[in-house]
């Protein structure tokens, strides 16, 4: 008989365990699941991406951001292929929920938001009410507002740079095309 680990038919399923791990910041459980999946990044990211709460459609990352469970978030952000901006039923991303968390825990929440942005979270995504994460910032939290606005600006500049590059490449192709036409005359 094979010694390979298979999902248990007794007890909680992997999705249930991942959700519980996110709720309780139980990194030991998360690391145990990671080990049972032989540290397969693809299987682990698929498990995390496909696991949602039934009513809210929150992913484990949503839950951990809502509760400020940094240790869980830190491990998840290091797993290749995990979706950083999934949207729940209210079309909120984990970043929306992390910003809401800063109302009660400004310093810890700021740290989480900063790390989500560093991992590539998009601060321009709007929820079902048309609000971006920065729209949930406590009016007294200038530092967080500046962080989110800077991230939005940086992304808009990336888009502008990509547009310029595309226009330049198109111009180069047009010049190359007209040069080869004049050579054939």
Image (cartoon, rainbow, N blue to C red):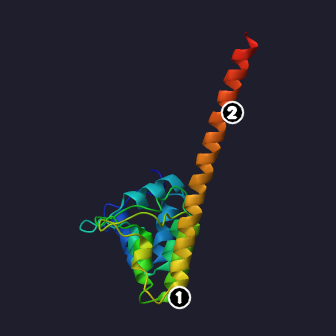
Q: Residue 111 appears at what percent x and percent y? A: 55, 81
Q: What residue is drawn where x is 42% and y is 70%?
A: 94
Q: What residue is drawn where x is 55% and y is 63%?
A: 120
Asked if residue 74 can be seen in this view, the reply is no
Q: What residue is drawn where x is 43% and y is 81%?
A: 137
Indicate the secondary structure of the residue bearing disc 1. Answer: helix
Front-most of residues 28 and 70: 70
Q: Nearer the viewer, mark 2 or mark 1?
A: 2
How many residues crowd mark 1 within 10 Å: few (<14), some (14–19), many (20+)?
A: some
What residue would you read off at disc 1? Answer: 107
Front-most of residues 132 and 105: 132
Q: Which image quarter holds the C terminus?
A: top right
Left or right, 130 with respect to 168, comes to: left
Front-most of residues 44 and 122: 122
Looking at the image, is mark 2 or mark 1 earlier in the sequence?
A: 1
Q: In which quarter of the view is residue 48 placed?
A: bottom left
Asked if residue 157 can be seen in this view, the reply is yes
Q: Report the disc number at residue 172.
A: 2
Q: Against 45, is 177 above or below?
A: above
């Amino acid at each position: 008989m094979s010694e390979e680990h298979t999902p248990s038919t007794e007890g909680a399923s992997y999705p249930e365990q991942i959700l519980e791990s996110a709720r309780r910041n139980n990194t030991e459980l998360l690391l145990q699941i990671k080990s049972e999946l032989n540290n397969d990044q693809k299987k682990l990211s698929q498990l995390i991406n496909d696991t949602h709460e039934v009513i809210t459609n929150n992913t484990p990352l949503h839950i951990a951001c809502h509760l400020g469970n940094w240790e869980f978030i830190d491990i998840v952000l290091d797993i290749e292929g995990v979706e950083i901006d999934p949207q729940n039923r209210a079309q909120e991303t984990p970043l929306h929920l992390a910003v809401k968390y800063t109302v009660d825990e400004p310093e810890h929440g700021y740290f989480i938001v900063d790390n989500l942005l560093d991992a590539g979270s998009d601060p321009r995504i709007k929820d079902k009410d048309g609000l971006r994460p920065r729209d949930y910032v406590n009016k007294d939290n200038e530092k967080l507002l500046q962080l989110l606005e800077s991230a939005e600006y940086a992304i808009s500049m990336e888009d502008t740079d990509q547009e310029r590059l595309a226009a330049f490449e198109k111009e180069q192709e047009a010049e190359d095309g007209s040069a080869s036409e004049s050579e054939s005359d």
